[in-house]
Image (cartoon, helix red, strand yellow):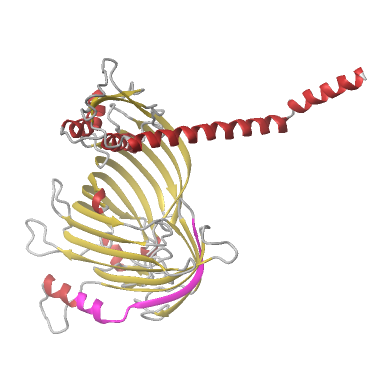
């Protein structure tokens, strides 16, 4: 009997130390801790709810755990909460809301770990007077942060519009203690053969809604659809700001770029050869974006509005090209029923040549500045740069364009709407024109030519393609495999100036699809 009892004890001890038993105990302990935490949070919420209208004010707000961050930077982050507290008519509910705004600001800069707890208490020398319950209660707030590593090195692959690339990146966080970032990058891709850039970003006045970005770059881009490689070296300075109440993002940037069209193909057209060589671009650009889509890669509802205006030929470098370039884009996603989404987009742009200071008349636009449309991410059913003026096999680009699409996205069979897989059917098209002289005018000025060109855009039928395909919306990029059927193309393949359509399967990868 004793031996049997001893065996039972050893069996029990053996079972208690088994991995399955330990895992079950840990799971039970975790569930118990979560239950206690939920109950504590519920009690705290009930307490706050019951006292949300209690008048309070901030006696102090302290941020702990930020030895590498400037005091002045942190003070500006919490100043709105302190100022709001001093205005009077300030309750516990208001205090929690202001603290939440400050914590959101700390999280936005990505120099601290995202989990930022805070504590509220009264000063040690405060004595509550129950006879005056309406007197404001002083609060001492403590925000605990933990700084992230200041140095980040990584390598990997990336997917952008119409290309993939491999990269090596290095970043230095919180360079001067005010959420500044220094970012160095080198990449090689399928179209951008090499790209070097150094970017320095700093917030404006500690605001998570405004920043200054300074960027130096050197890129080599393979423009095989126009029989050349484009080298760009230079500087871009940008001021960005956001208006969350209207879901607006804006930026103003200046770019000074030295561009070289080189490595021309043996059969490059005369038009490409004429634009080969060096040019200097000096331009200011304003960009406005309003995006209410629920998912920018695979939206099921919401709308996008984007306006871009650029003036080249001004600024400290002046440059060798001068123009006004304007683009507008709008997109809409509308849920129908049973996971089916209707999507549409319309966009257009003009390139209006201007005269450089000292020149009597504007110069024609160059291939590096013109619009190029067509491709798997752009107007499906056409090759990259397949629409608009061509010389031989070269896309020459155009000075005015309009493009649009209409499509339906369906849930993938037996997968459900929660998956990123979709079936799609679409029709899209566009028209791209070079600046032309009206037939009845002998000596054209730019205004007459642009008016005539835009009237043609609006009255002539666009080039069209339709298709069906499979879409996968990954958090990093959108993948599409479509069967495309061009149904309206200008010119016949092989003819001089004919547009370049693509019938059959077309594969697209990118973060933006028109």
Q: Position of residue 458 (x, y in %)?
A: 24, 78
Is residue 354 visible to us here? yes
Which residue is most to the front?
131
Q: Residue at x 8, y 60 (%)?
A: 359
| Quadrant position of the N terminus in the picture | top right
Q: Residue at x 46, y 69 (%)?
A: 337
Q: Position of residue 306 (x, y in %)?
A: 27, 59
Is residue 70 visible to us here? no
Q: Position of residue 17 (x, y in %)?
A: 73, 25
In the depicted view, which residue is nearer to us: 326 or 91? 91
What is the tally of numbered marks visible in this picture? 0
Task: Give the residues in magenta.
Answer: 453-473
Displayed quadrant of residue 501: bottom left
| Quadrant position of the C terminus in the picture | bottom left
Q: Residue at x 27, y 55 (%)?
A: 289
Q: Residue at x 15, y 34 (%)?
A: 87
Horizontal side of 28 relative to 394 (left or right) equals right
Displayed quadrant of residue 287: bottom left
Q: Is residue 455 magenta?
A: yes
Which residue is most to the bottom?
440
């Amino acid at each position: 009997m004793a031996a049997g009892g001893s065996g039972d004890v050893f069996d029990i001890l053996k079972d208690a130390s088994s991995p399955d038993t330990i895992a079950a105990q840990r799971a039970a302990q975790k569930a118990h801790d979560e239950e206690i935490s939920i109950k504590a949070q519920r009690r705290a919420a009930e307490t706050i709810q019951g006292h949300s209208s209690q008048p309070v004010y901030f006696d102090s707000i302290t941020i702990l755990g930020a030895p590498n961050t400037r005091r002045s930077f942190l003070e500006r982050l919490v100043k709105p909460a302190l100022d709001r507290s001093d205005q009077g008519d300030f309750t516990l509910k208001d205090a929690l809301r202001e603290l939440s705004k400050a914590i959101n600001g700390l999280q936005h800069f990505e120099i601290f770990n995202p989990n930022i707890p805070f504590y509220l208490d009264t000063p040690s020398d405060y004595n509550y007077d129950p006879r005056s319950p309406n007197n404001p209660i002083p609060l001492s707030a403590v925000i605990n942060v933990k700084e992230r590593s200041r140095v980040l090195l990584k390598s990997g692959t990336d997917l952008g519009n119409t290309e993939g690339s491999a990269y090596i990146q290095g970043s230095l966080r919180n360079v001067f203690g005010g959420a500044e970032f220094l970012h160095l990058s080198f990449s090689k891709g399928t179209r951008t053969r090499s790209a070097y850039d150094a970017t320095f970003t700093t917030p404006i006045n500690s605001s998570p809604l405004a920043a200054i970005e300074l960027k130096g770059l050197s890129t080599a881009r393979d423009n095989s659809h126009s029989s050349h490689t484009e080298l760009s070296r230079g500087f871009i300075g940008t001021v960005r700001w956001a208006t969350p109440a209207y879901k607006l993002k804006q930026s103003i940037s200046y770019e000074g770029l030295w561009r070289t069209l080189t490595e021309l193909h043996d059969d490059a057209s005369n038009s490409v050869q004429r634009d080969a060589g060096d040019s200097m671009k000096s331009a200011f650009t304003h960009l406005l974006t309003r995006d209410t889509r629920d998912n920018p890669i695979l939206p099921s509802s919401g709308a996008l509005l984007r306006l871009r205006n650029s003036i080249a030929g001004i600024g400290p470098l002046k440059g060798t090209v001068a123009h006004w370039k304007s683009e507008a884009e709008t997109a809409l996603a509308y849920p129908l029923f049973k996971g089916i989404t209707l999507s549409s987009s319309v966009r257009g742009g003009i390139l209006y040549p201007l005269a450089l200071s000292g020149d009597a008349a504007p110069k024609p636009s160059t291939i590096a500045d013109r619009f190029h449309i067509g491709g798997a991410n752009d107007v499906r059913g056409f090759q990259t740069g397949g629409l608009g003026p061509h010389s031989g096999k070269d896309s020459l680009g155009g000075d005015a364009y309009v493009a649009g699409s209409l499509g339906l996205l369906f849930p993938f069979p037996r997968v459900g709407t929660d998956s990123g897989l979709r079936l799609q059917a679409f029709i899209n098209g566009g028209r791209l024109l070079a600046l032309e002289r009206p037939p009845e005018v002998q000596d054209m000025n730019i205004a007459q030519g642009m008016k005539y060109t835009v009237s043609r855009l609006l009255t002539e039928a666009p080039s069209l393609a339709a298709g069906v395909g499979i879409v996968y919306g990954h958090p990093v990029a959108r993948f599409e495999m479509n069967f495309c059927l061009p149904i309206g193309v200008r010119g016949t393949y092989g003819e001089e100036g004919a547009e370049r359509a693509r019938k059959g399967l077309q594969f697209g990868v990118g973060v933006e699809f028109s």
